[in-house]
Image (tube, rainbow, N blue to C red):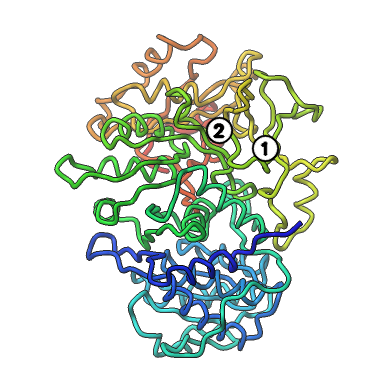
């Protein structure tokens, strides 16, 4: 089967219209976004490729990219593919241990690192991570922020195998697809329950998914895509690649400043956006009606904090934007599935939908027997196709443990199939509650709590009750105007739940906190359910007060 190559698609776009804007480097509203034409991006990538080749990057090697959403990160992806290498994204928020884990697992030949990003000391973190790794020490390539000259003293980034910069007017390599297609990029999973895995995808998978997303969301050469989530994560990467390979424009934001991002979204006339509800709820809070109108036509939203439905209703009324719930992961690509604009609300504001491409096969299987289940019956969502992870860097055994004997990827997600070919994402299988013998989606209880005017965030977990069975324990962060102890009451919220929920679904306790423990991952901020389950068990045992400011 002939596979479409990423550099072939991009090079054709450069040849057709070299001066068209491929990327906009945002500045969080402090000044207008800086345009990067297709030709400029190709030249920058070619110069990076020359230096990577000089550092002996060869087919199959990994190039770690540790920088914010700069156009240089996209250029490095193109440069790596020119040499047959793959990129491993590192989140700029990662600490020393997390970076050392990436070095151990991915064993990159080169680390491409940002110089002078938001006063973040990446040098110190990299130095300490290199001292902790058991992998061969990488060479370092230092890239400056967009518009600034090359780093004058790259040697301060040297961790033992040299550090280099890209000359401003250095030679370039032509961007040509390498004769052998291999891995293209690897994403770190959330790691909320343990060490993050590095899920790697082939070039074929990246290109096929990007083009499918572009077509399904109606992108064209006039479209502008929001890129505020880190490119090191699958949720940030996929929409930007879709824009790049469609001839659209991607707005890249290196930092997430609410009002600044809103200003850039308006100024750039952004038409498409994808992200988690924590991102969009922040934009909603920063919005005021006298701002310039939004051009947003389509938003794909993932529900991490239980706020997606409230935002979707607001955005469709305030901005006239179509909002749909999405489904995806580092292993199956972001936007692997989403709802259609014609699907009814509020169902289409939740997770799930239909696969973005007919090449993606899916089924629901009984978690115990592995046999397919009928429509309307809950089961594990499983996939087969180009979108499924091709390798786990550093631990190939994970591929086998994540696959069935007949070749289906086991997502670990619980879903429900509908007779129109769509599915609803329910929750992670480890999060589902068995209350009084019934399987209960915690989101059902969370949604009821979020309907209370004094509740801002709600998360429900299961814990063993005093009589031995599982009970629901709800954790709530109140709204700003109800944050005082006297303003929100556990008994009030329990009574609120009892008004519309079956008795066995009413939480045993409602724990009121000023904040919840979270993981700031590459795809958005997720609440750490495992940590809450531990706290819930301690509370039921009487070891922890029901209200605490600790997160």
Quarter of the image with the N terminus is: bottom right
* Percent x, y of residue 490: 37, 21
Q: Residue furthest left?
A: 290
The label on residue 352 is 2
Q: Residue at x 49, y 72 (%)?
A: 15
Marks 2 and 1, the one that precedes in the sequence? 2
* Percent x, y of residue 210: 55, 53
517 vs 101: above or below: above
* Percent x, y of residue 191: 59, 51
- For marks 2 and 1, give the CA distance: 14 Å
Q: Which tag is nearer the camera, tag 2 or tag 1?
A: 2
Q: Residue furthest right?
A: 405
Q: Nearer the viewer, residue 146 or 232?
A: 146
**Label 1: how many Cα within 10 Å (few below 14, some 14–19, many 20+):** some
216 vs 444: above or below: below
Q: What residue is pinned by disc 1? A: 412
Q: Is residue 31 left or right of residue 86?
A: left
**Label 2: how many Cα within 10 Å (few below 14, some 14–19, many 20+):** many
Q: Is residue 140 left or right of residue 30?
A: right
255 vs 540: above or below: below
């Amino acid at each position: 089967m002939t596979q479409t190559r990423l550099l072939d698609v991009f090079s054709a776009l450069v040849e057709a219209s070299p001066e068209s804007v491929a990327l906009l480097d945002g500045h969080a509203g402090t000044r207008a976004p800086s345009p990067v034409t297709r030709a400029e991006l190709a030249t920058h990538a070619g110069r990076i490729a020359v230096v990577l080749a000089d550092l002996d990057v060869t087919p199959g090697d990994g190039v770690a990219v540790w920088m914010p959403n700069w156009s240089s990160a996209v250029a490095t992806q193109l440069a790596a593919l020119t040499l047959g290498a793959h990129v491993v994204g590192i989140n700029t928020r990662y600490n020393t241990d997390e970076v050392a884990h990436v070095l151990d697992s991915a064993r990159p030949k080169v680390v491409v690192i940002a110089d002078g990003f938001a006063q973040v000391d990446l040098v110190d973190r990299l130095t300490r991570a290199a001292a902790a790794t058991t992998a061969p020490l990488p060479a370092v390539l230092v890239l400056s922020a967009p518009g600034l000259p090359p780093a004058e003293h790259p040697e301060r980034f040297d961790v033992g195998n040299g550090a280099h910069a890209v000359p401003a007017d250095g030679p370039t390599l032509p961007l040509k697809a390498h004769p052998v297609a291999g891995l293209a990029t690897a994403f770190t999973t959330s790691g909320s329950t343990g060490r993050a895995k590095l899920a790697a995808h082939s070039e074929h998978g990246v290109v096929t998914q990007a083009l499918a997303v572009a077509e399904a969301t109606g992108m064209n050469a006039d479209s502008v895509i929001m890129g505020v989530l880190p490119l090191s994560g699958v949720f940030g990467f996929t929409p930007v690649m879709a824009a790049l390979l469609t001839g659209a424009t991607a707005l890249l934001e290196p930092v997430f400043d609410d009002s600044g991002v809103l200003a850039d979204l308006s100024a750039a006339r952004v038409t498409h956006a994808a992200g988690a509800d924590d991102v969009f709820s922040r934009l909603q809070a920063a919005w005021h009606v006298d701002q310039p109108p939004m051009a947003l036509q389509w938003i794909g939203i993932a529900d991490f904090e239980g706020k997606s439905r409230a935002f979707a209703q607001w955005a469709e009324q305030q901005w006239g934007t179509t909002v749909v719930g999405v489904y995806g992961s580092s292993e199956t690509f972001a936007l692997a599935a989403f709802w259609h604009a014609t699907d009814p609300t509020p169902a289409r504001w939740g997770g799930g939908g239909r696969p973005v491409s007919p090449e993606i096969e899916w089924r629901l299987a009984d978690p115990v027997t592995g046999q397919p289940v009928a429509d309307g019956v809950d089961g594990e969502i499983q996939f087969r196709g180009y979108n499924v992870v091709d390798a786990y860097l550093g631990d190939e055994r994970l591929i086998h443990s994540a696959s069935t004997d007949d070749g289906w990827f086991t997502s670990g997600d619980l879903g429900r199939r509908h007779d129109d070919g769509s599915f609803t994402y329910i929750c992670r299988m480890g999060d589902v509650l068995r209350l009084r013998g019934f399987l209960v989606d915690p989101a059902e209880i969370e949604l009821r709590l979020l309907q209370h005017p004094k509740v801002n965030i709600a998360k429900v977990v299961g814990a063993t009750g005093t009589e031995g069975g599982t009970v629901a324990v709800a954790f709530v962060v109140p709204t700003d105007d109800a944050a005082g102890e006297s303003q929100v009451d556990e008994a009030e919220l329990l009574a609120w739940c009892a008004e519309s929920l079956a008795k066995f679904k009413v939480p045993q306790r409602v724990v009121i906190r000023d904040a919840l423990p979270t993981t700031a991952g590459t795809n958005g901020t997720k609440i750490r359910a495992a940590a809450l389950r531990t706290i819930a068990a301690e509370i039921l045992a009487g070891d922890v007060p029901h209200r605490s400011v600790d997160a």
